[in-house]
Image (cartoon, rainbow, N blue to C red):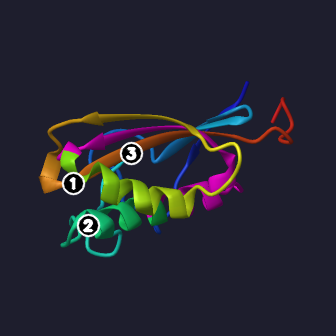
Amino acid sequence: MKVERISTSRAPAPLARYSQAIRAGNTLYLQGIIPIDPDTGRVVVGDIEIHTRRVFESMKAILESAGMGMENVVKITVFLADPAEYSKFNEIYNAYFGTEPPPARTTVGSNLLLGARLEIDAIAYEPTRARHS
């Protein structure tokens, strides 16, 4: 199976030696994304809603670079700096994932780098992609 690095300038560049995403066959593994503005390289200023939108816009950009969309996401792990912000996060999440079935999801409280309010990683799947590409 071919393994391919996926990257885009429309999402934050990795802060260390890792990839924005790796495609392995029909599956795409996305990095943990924090709310960094790809133009400035800094964490966006604002509340959990602003942070959440920035993360999902970066996720969309990475998925699009791989020829996929949010509907291809099958698993998400969410790390919230403040679990009390869960409800506000969830409202934005629901706007981005209105598909059925929704992705499987794990949400945990966590200390995060650079003052980020959340970090999200994801796995996406494209059933129509050729198995030997």
The residue sitting at 83% across, 41% down in the picture is 129
The residue sitting at 39% across, 59% down in the picture is 55
The residue sitting at 22% across, 43% down in the picture is 83
Q: Tell me if residue 17 comes above or below residue 66 in the rendering.
A: above
Q: What amino acid is labelled 3 in the image?
A: Ile
| Disc 3 versus disc 2: nearer the observer | 3
Query: Which secondary structure, mark 2?
Result: loop
Q: Identify the residue under disc 3.
A: 120
- Please report whichever mark, 1 or 2, sits nearer to the chain's N-terminal start: 2
Q: Mark 3 to mark 2: distance in Å?
A: 17 Å
The residue stretch that appears in magenta = 58-83
Q: Nearer the viewer, residue 105 or 63?
A: 105
Q: x and y percent of residue 4 in the render?
A: 62, 39
Q: Identify the residue under disc 1.
A: 117
Q: Nearer the viewer, residue 33 or 52?
A: 52
Q: x and y percent of residue 42 in the render?
A: 21, 67
Q: Tell me if residue 39 comes above or below residue 31 in the rendering.
A: below
Q: Identify the residue under disc 2.
A: 41
- Please report whichever mark, 3 or 2, sits nearer to the chain's N-terminal start: 2
Q: What amino acid is labelled 2 in the image?
A: Gly
| Disc 1 versus disc 2: nearer the observer | 1
The residue sitting at 46% across, 56% down in the picture is 93
Q: Mark 3 to mark 1: distance in Å?
A: 10 Å
**Quarter the N terminus occupies:** top right
